[in-house]
Amino acid sequence: MVTAIVLITAEPGRVAALGQELADTKGVYAAYSVAGEEDLVALVRAVAHEELADIVTSRIASLAGITGTRTLIAFRAYSSEDLANI
């Protein structure tokens, strides 16, 4: 299982709608609007890196109103909640 954190920059008028669209995207298990340089954060889980690449480039980055993404790939999980689900 590959877990990634996708930091998303969006057009200001699309943040709320994009949050829901991200939450409904296959492979995204949580989406948050955030304060700071990015507007949204999506937590993604995939079986393999190839699937992760598809989720980020084909499903997330192609949503209308997204102007940029940065993807952080997790190496290890330290959260007891995450470890219980492995």
Image (cartoon, rainbow, N blue to C red):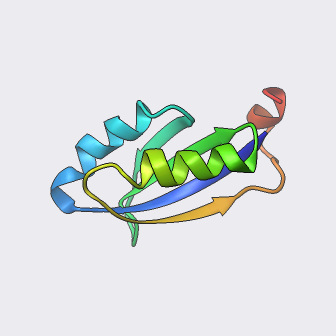
Most extreme residue toward the top, as rendered? 85
Q: Is residue 23 left or right of residue 1?
A: left
Q: Is residue 49 left or right of residue 63?
A: right
In the displayed structure, would residue 65 be above or below residue 77?
below
- Name the residue at 66% across, 43% down: 51
Toward which corner of the image does residue 44 lie, by quadrant?
top right
- Name the residue at 45% across, 42% down: 31
Most extreme residue toward the left, as rendered? 13
Residue 24: give x, y in percent of width and height.
Answer: 41, 30
Quadrant housing the C terminus: top right
Most extreme residue toward the bottom, as rendered? 37
Q: Is residue 50 left or right of residue 53?
A: right
Residue 72: give x, y in percent of width and height.
Answer: 64, 62
Residue 19: give x, y in percent of width and height.
Answer: 34, 42
Residue 34: give x, y in percent of width and height.
Answer: 39, 56
Q: Is residue 20 left or right of residue 13?
A: right
In the displayed structure, would residue 42 be above or below residue 29?
below
Number of residue marks? 0
Quadrant housing the N terminus: top right
In the displayed structure, would residue 12 be above or below residue 83?
below
- Name the residue at 26% across, 51% down: 64
- Name the residue at 53% across, 37% down: 28
Q: Nearer the viewer, residue 18 or 37?
A: 18
